């Protein structure tokens, strides 16, 4: 059984954050904002993947 990593509210928040950061790239603020948002997203995704893998290993014992 797969576990959902992100709630609907988190998905919406990341989508809005990406849109805002891309829209503000001409203002120079958008690039660091986009970088940190993407880094947070992929870190959370990696953490979720590791938790799923750990749960699978524990279940197989």
Image: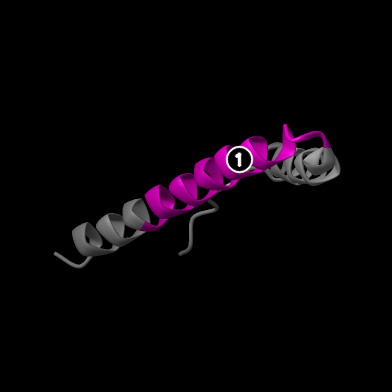
Q: Which segment did they paint magenta?
A: 27-49
Residue 46 image offset from top left, x and y in percent = 41, 54
Q: Which residue is at a point 49% across and 55% down the rendered structure image?
A: 3
**Residue at the (13%, 64%) spot, across then down:** 61
Q: From the viewer's perspective, is residue 4 above or below residue 24?
A: below
Asked if residue 23 lies left or right of residue 34, the reply is right
For this rendering, which residue is in front, 34 or 43?
Answer: 34
Q: Main secondary structure of the magenta part?
A: helix
In the rendered image, residue 29, in percent from the top left (x then y), is placed at 72, 32
SS at circle 1: helix
Q: Residue furthest left?
A: 61
**Residue 11 image offset from top left, x and y in percent:** 70, 45
* Residue 40 horizontal side relative to residue 23, left or right: left
Residue at image point 34% right, 51% down: 51
Question: Is 57 colored magenta in this rendering?
Answer: no
Q: Position of residue 1 (x, y in %)?
A: 46, 64
Figure colour scheme: one colour
Along the horizontal axis of the image, is 42 left or right of 22?
A: left
Viewer-proximal residue among 4 and 34: 34
Question: In the displayed structure, would residue 58 be above or below residue 7?
Answer: below
Q: Residue at x 30, y 61 (%)?
A: 53
Q: Which residue is mark 1?
A: 37
Tell me the quarter of the picture where residue 25 sits: top right
């Amino acid at each position: 059984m797969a576990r959902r990593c992100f709630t609907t509210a988190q998905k919406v928040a990341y989508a809005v954050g990406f849109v805002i950061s891309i829209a503000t790239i001409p203002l120079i603020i958008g690039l660091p904002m986009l970088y940190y948002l993407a880094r947070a997203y992929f870190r959370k995704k990696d953490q979720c993947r590791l938790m799923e893998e750990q749960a699978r290993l524990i279940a197989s014992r």
